[in-house]
Amino acid sequence: MTRTDDKTGPNHVAVIMDGNGRWAQQRGRPRLFGHHAGARRVREIVRACPDEGVKYLTIFAFSTENWKRTQTEVSGLMALFRRYIMREAKALFDEGVRVRFIGDRIKLDDKLVRLMDNLEMFTADNDKVHLTIALNYGGRDEVTRAAQRLAFEVEQGRLSYKDVDAETLSKFLDTRFLPDPDLVIRTSGEARISNFLLWQSAYAEYEFIDTLWPDFTKDVFAQVLSGYGKRERRFGAVLA
């Protein structure tokens, strides 16, 4: 598969939304001020997806490692997630966005989990944009949980170990309903993937940009996507 036409963009874009805290600190404000600004930016990028031909958008909202942050920041983030769902639910529904969450929900509070479940059901019939929010998510944790579920199926005799391959394991991942990402973007100048979609991004293109997430406008998004169209995706093959 080769993409050489700059009008041809990625179908699935995943974003590591980094830089909220630094953006706030540069303005002499608390880190949570930056997270609120970042949440508003999500709204803009989701709305830009149809015009850019992006059907699937996956965003990294809170990692399994983010629990190590201060209690004030973690509590503020959880409150922000609840507020975001309550405030954005109707707009997301009206704009044809289907919302799903990936990650381990066990450590999340009951009210947040109920809101997540309700939003998934509320938008289940939408198909214009598929927004997936990674919340208490880590790539290694996801693969571990998938392997546990797969091992249980083998233990129960519903699956033979001889049938276990990459395709089988993929069906036990949180992202089993998604195509693999074509492009992964990380903002804020950091060049690492931070345990995000490790399995799914094996052949994704990566773009590391200096822009902090609250400054990641739809114009910056369009610029990054235009660069993707000029890349050749070889998937391990040698193209003639």
Image (spheres, helix red, strand yellow):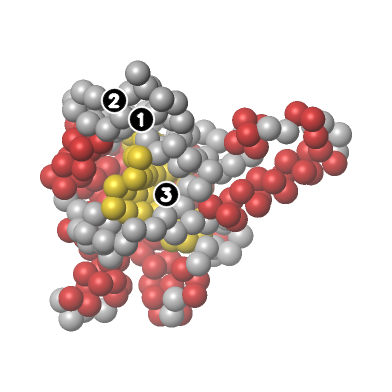
**Residue 35 image offset from top left, x and y in percent:** 29, 66
Give the residue type that dot 1 points to.
Arg
Which residue is at the far left? 219
**Residue 204 image offset from top left, x and y in percent:** 40, 39
* Spatial CA span between label 3 and label 1: 26 Å
Residue at x 34% of width, y 58% of height: 191
Look at the numbered discs 1 and 2 and tell me whether their residues touch, using CB distance below 8 Å: yes
Which residue is disc 1 drawn over?
A: 233
Q: Depth check: give the residue in front, 83 or 44.
A: 44
User: Residue 95 has which mark?
Assistant: none
Residue at x 22% of width, y 77% of height: 25
Which residue is disc 2 drawn over?
A: 3
Residue 125 falls left or right of residue 212: right
User: Residue 133 has which mark?
Assistant: 3
Give the residue type that dot 3 points to.
Ile
Above or below, comparing residue 94 to residue 68 in the picture: above
Residue 234 falls left or right of residue 220: right
Above or below, comparing residue 55 to residue 212 in the picture: above
